[in-house]
Image (cartoon, helix red, strand yellow):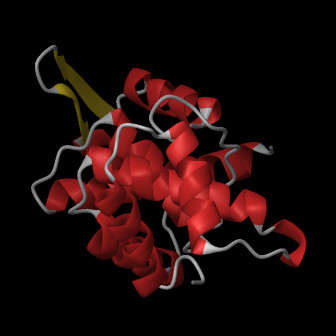
Amino acid sequence: MTNEKKEENIAMVSAIISKLNERGCEPGKTTIQKLVFFGQMAYNLPIEYSFEPYNYGPYSFELANDLENMEYKGILNVDYNPIIGFKIRRTEKALQDAVILSDTINETIMKLITDWGHSTPKELELFSTFLYIYKQETRGGQKISSADLIGKVRKIKYKHGDAEYTSSLNYLIEKGIIQG
């Protein structure tokens, strides 16, 4: 990845965090991972991270590294509380040093935050797992039934009830993220 592309990735991640902060939300690392995943996979943001299945759904080690570097450079303020977890805020330095993103990218980020910024990390974990498996299973134009998709998600995320799997999938279908 070129330095220019890496800077653009960081600018988009920073903008996602900033938009959440503006709404009074201080997201944790799981929320950021899932929103960046959704931005890339469902909203066609030109973010380039590799995601793989992990404990709490799709995870990018590159993104985790970028978040650490952003904290080190003073772009993010990351606080940890053992009871509630991480809280991440974009700093004033980030606002001063921000790379200007196109109106189209900013509008897409706003739509992403409007659609998913209210979701809990647990909800995002399940939604993103559905999307990850759906994308994997439908590569090359293949189709997957709702029942098969739920079955594959259930094997990975077995802690949820039947109604939760169904309602999560239906929500993704309603949003047009997954084809029913």
Q: Is residue 147 above or below residue 68?
A: below
Residue that appears at 49% across and 55% down = 128
Identify the residue at the far top of this view: 82
Q: Which x, y percent locates residue 121? A: 29, 45
Residue in the foreground of this view, choosing between 42 and 67:
42
Q: Is residue 167 above or below residue 96?
A: below
Q: Is residue 62 left or right of residue 138?
A: left
Q: Is residue 57 above or below residue 16?
A: above
Q: Quadrant of residue 94?
A: top left
Q: How many marks?
A: 0
Q: Is residue 87 left or right of residue 71?
A: left
Q: Which x, y percent locates residue 12? A: 49, 58
Q: Is residue 22 left or right of residue 33?
A: left
Quadrant where the image shows the C terminus? bottom right
Residue that appears at 51% across and 69% down = 101
Q: Which x, y percent locates residue 30? A: 37, 38
Q: Is residue 122 left or right of residue 146?
A: left
Q: Is residue 157 visible?
A: yes
Quadrant where the image shows the N terminus? top right
Q: Is residue 96 visible?
A: no
Residue that appears at 30% across and 62% down = 163
